[in-house]
């Protein structure tokens, strides 16, 4: 589904969308809001690049960050849940990862964790290893995967 099709599906179902982004820096929100008329479906986007922003804007627990790190399914879940809790949206997607360059033995470049939360349902999470594609390509791949998650949820 294209961003326009995602918005149309949400519109048909009467759902509002929010995004919570770290490594993509707002690219998912930008893809959706590039579509004319998106304001009736896209409720808001959170760019929570720092850990402090994740805590302040989305209610991610400091203890979760300390126990698992920002790039974790636990944080992705709390980001997605927080986007719903701090917005009027019914559906939220979250992205947190290591775009590069760099990474570590335990959290390599290209690892991105995603969360998808829908009002009244338990959030689902997953981790994708995109590999060391380079910063720009990891970010684009993460954006596209987040959009695909929204599309599947609305499918």
Image (cartoon, rainbow, N blue to C red):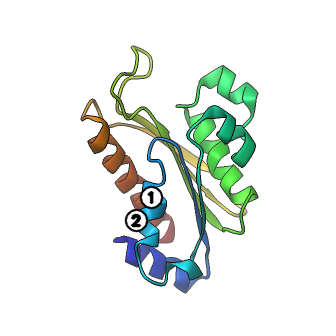
Judged from this view, the residue extending furthest toward the top is 105
* Badge number at residue 71: none
Judged from this view, the residue extending furthest toward the left is 133
| Neighbour tally class for label 1: few under 14, some 14-19, many 20 plus, Cα within 10 Å | many
Local secondary structure at mark 2: helix
Residue located 39% across and 77% down the image: 4
Find residue 17 and report its horizontal and vertical position in percent.
Answer: 58, 68
Read off the residue under disc 1: 28
Q: Taking 8 as reference, is 144 left or right?
A: left
In this rendering, does residue 122 appear at all? Answer: no
Residue located 43% across and 82% down the image: 36
Find residue 134 and report its horizontal and vertical position in percent.
Answer: 26, 34
In the image, 120 versus 107, the foreground residue is 107
In this rendering, does residue 69 appear at all? Answer: yes
* Badge number at residue 31: 2
Q: Tell me where residue 109 sits by quadrant.
A: top left
Q: Taking 138 as reference, is 58 left or right?
A: right
Asked if residue 33 is positioned above or below residue 100 in the image, the reply reads below
Residue located 58% across and 41% down the image: 76
Task: Measure the C-alpha gap from mark 1 to mark 2.
Answer: 5 Å
Residue located 47% across and 77% down the image: 7
Q: Mark 1 touching mark 2, by CB under 8 A?
A: yes
Image quadrant occupied by the N terminus = bottom left
Image quadrant occupied by the C terminus = bottom left
Find residue 132 and report its horizontal and vertical position in percent.
Answer: 27, 30
Local secondary structure at mark 1: helix
Asked if residue 128 is positioned above or below residue 146 in the image, the reply reads above
In the image, 137 versus 119, the foreground residue is 137
Find residue 135 and report its horizontal and vertical position in percent.
Answer: 31, 37
| Neighbour tally class for label 2: few under 14, some 14-19, many 20 plus, Cα within 10 Å | some
């Amino acid at each position: 589904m294209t961003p326009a099709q995602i918005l149309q599906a949400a519109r048909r179902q009467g759902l509002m969308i929010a995004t919570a982004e770290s490594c993509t820096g707002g690219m998912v929100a930008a893809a959706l809001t590039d579509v004319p008329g998106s304001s009736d479906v896209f409720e808001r986007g959170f760019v929570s690049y720092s850990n402090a922003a994740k805590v302040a804007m989305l209610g991610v627990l400091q203890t979760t960050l300390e126990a698992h790190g920002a790039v974790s399914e636990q944080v992705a879940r709390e980001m997605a849940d927080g986007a719903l809790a701090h917005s009027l949206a019914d559906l939220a997607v979250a992205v947190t990862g290591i775009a590069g360059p760099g990474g570590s033995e335990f959290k390599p470049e290209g690892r991105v964790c995603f969360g998808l939360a829908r009002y009244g349902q338990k959030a689902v999470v997953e981790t994708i290893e995109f590999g060391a594609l380079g910063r720009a390509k990891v970010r684009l791949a993460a954006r596209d995967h987040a959009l695909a998650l929204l599309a599947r949820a609305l499918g």
